[in-house]
Image (tube, helix red, strand yellow):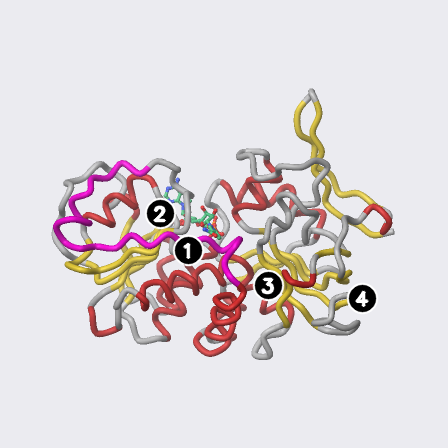
C-alpha cells in the first residue's frame, strides 16, 4: 500500500483527496520508483484545482516531476538503488505522477540524478527550474550573450522566474526582474537581479513597437505582458516564452518580428528530447548555486498539496514548493 494524492471526476465534478492505494493499481511501466521528493508546479496546481484541463485520464495521481530511488527495474538503463529524476512526458497528466510514495514509469523517461544535487535540491529545481534552463539555452542559441545588454525575466518571484534570474545572473547577464510583488525585491536582488520592475509597467496594451530595451527575455506570463516584452526587445534579440500565468492570449503585432528581427522561441519541457534534458540538468549543475535553492524553496507535506495549489494559482507562492516524502 502507498499514499498518494488522487484526482477523480464524475458527473458531479472533480474531487481530490489524499488516499491509500495498492501497488497493484500502479500503471504499466518497466521501472518502479520509491519517491523521495515531489514538487508542486503551476501545472500541478492547475490539475489539482481543476482550473485547466491538465488531467486527461481519471483517476489520476498528479505530479509532473519527482526524484526517487529505483525499487525494481526491467529497463537495461536502471538498477534497483539508482537515484533518478523525472520531468514531464505526460506524467501527472495521462500517466500517474509524483505526488505519491511510489510511481511506476517507463525507464526511457528517467534521468540519473545530476551528481551536483541531492534529491531535494533537484526537486527545488524541478520542472520549473529545468524549464528556466531550457529558456536560457534558447536565448543562447539565438545569440543573446551577457555583453548583448540587459535581459528581462517576467513572473520573476515564481518558480521558473526565480531559477531564470539566478542562472542568468550567475552566467554574467544583467538581469531586470518583473514582478507583481515588489515586496519580493530583496529576495530577487539576492538571487542576482540588478533591477526590479513592477508588473504594472507591462500589463496595459502598448505600442506595436516600443523603445528597444532588452537583449533578451524569459517570459512565464504570456498575454499582454508577453506582447509588451516583444515590442521592447532590441534589434535581433530573442524572447523565450514558456508560460501562461497571465493568460493564453497573445495580443501582439508582427512588427517586432518583421521590423527588428526579434525571435520568439517557444519552450516546451514535457516532450523535450532526452539530449536537451541532459544538457539542461548538466548546465544547472554548473550554473546554479545550490546555496540559493534554500532561499527559493518551501517544503510542504503531501496532504498540504491540495490547499497550497490554490495559493500557487493565485500567484501568492514565492519560488518553489517541494514535497519531501518520508
Ligand atoms: P509560479 O506560480 O511559481 O510563477 C508564476 C509567476 O507569474 C507568479 O509567481 C507571478 O510572479 C506571475 N504571475 C502570476 N499570475 C500572474 C498574472 N495574472 N499576471 C502576470 N503575472 C502573473 O509558476 P511556475 O514558475 O512554476 O510556472 C510559470 C509558468 O510557466 C506557468 O504558466 C507554467 O504553466 C509555465 N510552465 C511551462 C512549462 C513548459 O514546458 N512550457 C514548464 C514549466 C512551467 P510575480 O509575483 O513575480 O509577478
| Sequence-first disc among 3 and 4 | 4
Residue drawn at (75%, 55%) of the image: 29
Q: Crowding at label 4, few (<14), some or many (≥20) Cα neighbours within 10 Å?
A: some
The answer to whether the residue bearing label 2 lies less than 8 angstroms from the nearest atom of ligand 1 is: yes
Q: Quadrant of residue 167?
A: bottom left
| Sequence-first disc among 2 and 1 | 1
Residue drawn at (64%, 72%) of the image: 112
287 left or right, relative to 301: left
| Sequence-first disc among 1 and 4 | 4
Mark 3 and mark 4: span between their CA atoms? 19 Å
Q: Which residue is mark 1?
A: 157
Q: Which residue is mark 2?
A: 180
Local SS, label 1:
loop
Local SS, label 4:
strand
Quadrant of the rendering where the C terminus is positioned: bottom right
Mark 1 and mark 3: span between their CA atoms? 17 Å
Vertical position of residue 320 compared to residue 180: above or below: below
Q: Magenta region's main secondary structure? A: loop
Q: Which residues are magenta?
A: 250-273
Mark 1 and mark 4: span between their CA atoms? 36 Å
Tags 2 and 1 touching, CB below 8 Å: yes
Query: Residue 98: x and y, percent?
Result: 68, 54
Tags 1 and 3 touching, CB below 8 Å: no
| Residue 123, numbered circle | 3
Q: Which residue is mark 4?
A: 71
67 left or right, relative to 248: right
Q: Nearer the viewer, mark 1 or mark 4?
A: 4
Residue 251 part of the magenta segment: yes
* Closer to us: 133 or 151: 133
Q: Crowding at label 1, few (<14), some or many (≥20) Cα neighbours within 10 Å?
A: many
Amino acid at each position: 500500500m502507498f499514499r498518494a494524492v488522487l484526482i477523480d471526476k464524475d458527473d458531479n465534478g472533480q474531487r481530490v483527496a489524499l488516499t491509500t492505494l495498492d501497488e497493484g493499481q500502479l500503471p504499466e511501466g518497466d521501472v518502479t520508483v520509491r519517491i523521495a521528493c515531489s514538487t508542486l508546479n503551476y501545472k500541478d496546481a492547475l490539475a489539482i484545482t481543476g482550473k485547466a484541463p491538465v488531467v486527461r485520464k481519471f483517476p489520476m495521481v498528479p505530479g509532473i516531476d519527482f526524484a526517487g530511488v529505483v525499487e525494481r527495474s526491467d529497463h537495461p538503463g536502471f538498477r534497483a538503488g539508482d537515484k533518478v529524476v523525472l520531468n514531464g512526458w505526460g506524467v501527472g497528466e495521462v500517466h500517474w505522477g509524483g505526488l505519491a510514495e511510489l510511481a511506476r514509469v517507463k525507464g526511457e523517461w528517467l534521468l540519473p540524478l545530476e551528481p551536483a544535487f541531492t534529491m531535494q535540491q533537484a526537486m527545488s529545481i524541478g520542472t520549473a527550474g529545468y524549464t528556466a534552463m531550457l529558456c536560457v539555452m534558447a536565448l543562447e542559441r539565438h545569440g543573446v550573450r551577457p555583453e548583448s545588454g540587459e535581459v528581462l525575466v517576467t513572473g520573476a518571484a515564481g518558480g521558473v522566474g526565480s531559477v531564470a534570474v539566478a542562472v542568468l545572473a550567475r552566467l554574467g547577464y544583467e538581469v531586470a526582474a518583473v514582478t507583481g510583488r515588489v515586496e519580493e525585491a530583496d529576495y530577487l536582488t539576492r538571487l542576482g537581479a540588478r533591477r526590479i520592475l513592477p508588473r504594472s509597467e507591462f500589463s496595459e496594451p502598448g505600442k506595436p513597437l516600443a523603445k528597444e530595451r532588452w537583449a533578451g527575455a524569459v517570459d512565464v506570463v504570456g498575454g499582454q505582458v508577453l506582447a509588451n516584452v516583444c515590442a521592447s526587445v532590441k534589434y535581433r534579440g530573442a524572447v523565450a516564452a514558456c508560460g501562461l500565468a497571465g493568460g493564453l492570449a497573445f495580443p501582439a503585432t508582427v512588427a517586432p518580428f518583421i521590423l527588428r528581427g526579434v525571435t520568439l522561441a517557444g519552450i516546451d519541457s514535457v516532450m523535450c528530447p532526452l539530449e536537451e534534458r541532459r544538457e539542461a540538468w548538466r548546465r544547472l549543475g554548473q550554473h546554479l548555486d545550490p546555496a540559493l535553492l534554500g532561499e527559493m524553496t518551501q517544503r510542504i507535506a503531501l496532504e498540504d498539496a491540495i490547499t497550497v495549489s490554490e495559493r500557487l494559482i493565485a500567484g501568492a507562492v514565492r519560488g518553489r514548493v517541494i514535497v519531501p516524502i518520508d
